[in-house]
Image (cartoon, grey):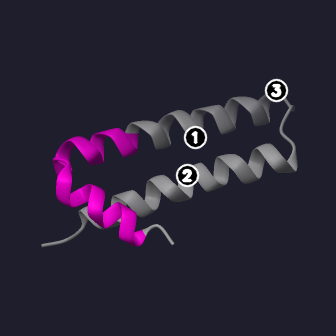
Amino acid sequence: MLALPAGAIADVVDRRKLLLLTQSVMLVVAVLLGVLTLAQVINPWILLGLTFALSVGSSMNMVQIRP
């Protein structure tokens, strides 16, 4: 679902900067997930949204692994 837009973005933007951006966003989302879980305010919708955000970041990173 995200392969075509991710590939187009990877062709236009510098891959190193895109990788740093996606890794930074994934770090923020993972920290937010951990903090919300420790605070016991997590619910299924928040978990679903944060998991989706991590998946988008992961799919953007997979485009970077190209020779």
Q: Are marks 1 and 2 in contact (CB under 8 Å)?
A: yes
Q: Are marks 1 and 3 in contact (CB under 8 Å)?
A: no
> Which residue is at 24% across, 67% downward?
65
Q: Are marks 2 and 3 in contact (CB under 8 Å)?
A: no
Residue bearing mark 3: 39
Whole-percent x, y for residue 62 in the image: 35, 66
The residue under label 3 is which amino acid type?
Ala
Distance, label 1 to label 2, CA atoms, is 8 Å
Q: Earlier in the sequence, mark 1 or mark 2?
A: 1
Residue bearing mark 1: 30
Q: Mark 1 Cα within 10 Å, few/some/many (few <14, many 20+)?
A: some
Distance, label 1 to label 3, CA atoms, is 14 Å
Query: Which secondary structure lies at badge 2?
Result: helix
Query: Which secondary structure lies at badge 1?
Result: helix
Residue 61, by quadrant, is: bottom left
> Which residue is at 29% across, 56% downward?
9
The residue under label 1 is which amino acid type?
Ala
Q: Quadrant of the C terminus?
A: bottom left
Give the residues in magenta.
3-23
Whole-percent x, y for residue 16 in the image: 18, 46
Foreground disc of the pair 1, 2:
2
